[in-house]
Image: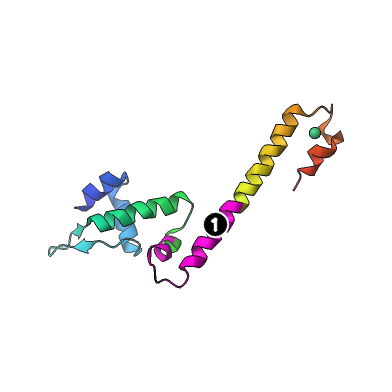
Amino acid sequence: MKIGEAASRLGVAVHVLRHWDDEGVVVPDRTPSGHREYTEEHFHRLRVLRACQGVGMSLPEIRQVLHRDEPERVGVIERRLHLIRTQRARLEAAERFLVHVVDCEHDLLTRCERCGQYAT
Ligand SMILES: [Zn+2]
């Protein structure tokens, strides 16, 4: 499919696909006249690229993740996993704090032992 169709199916602008091509993340075939040609396999890679962006990966990281034989591939994924788990732990602590605060019986939160325990 042509770049315009791939872009519209993916829901991004054409220049985004050109950028991903220039960065070597998803490199389509070229027609004899030089136009980009995306196969279903390319399109699938584009969707995986979007999923990787959705978990906060940069293009250089995604390029490594998409290539199975990249030596840094597992490291990139594990660093992202670690980051997400750290964020989740922080969010869960924030949630516990707020759930407590809404029911905290102290007149002043500064006098509550438990309120102070949530400080990082
Ligand atoms: Zn409290």
The magenta span reads: 62-85
Please tell me which residue is depicted at 40% across the width and 63% down the height of the picture.
Answer: 63
Q: What is the magenta segment's predominant secondary structure?
A: helix
The reply to whether the residue tagged 1 has its Cβ within 8 angstroms of ligand 1 is: no
Q: Is residue 71 left or right of residue 9?
A: right
Q: Identify the residue under disc 1.
A: 81
**Residue 68 in magenta stretch:** yes
Quick check: 117 above or below 38?
above
* Image position, residue 29 (x, y; %): 21, 63
Task: Say what secondary structure mark 1 lies in.
Answer: helix
Q: Is residue 70 left or right of residue 38?
A: right
Quick check: 4 above or below 102?
below
Q: Quadrant of ligand 1?
A: top right
Query: Which color scheme is applied?
Result: rainbow
The image quarter in which residue 28 lies: bottom left
Q: Residue type at mark 1: give it.
A: Leu
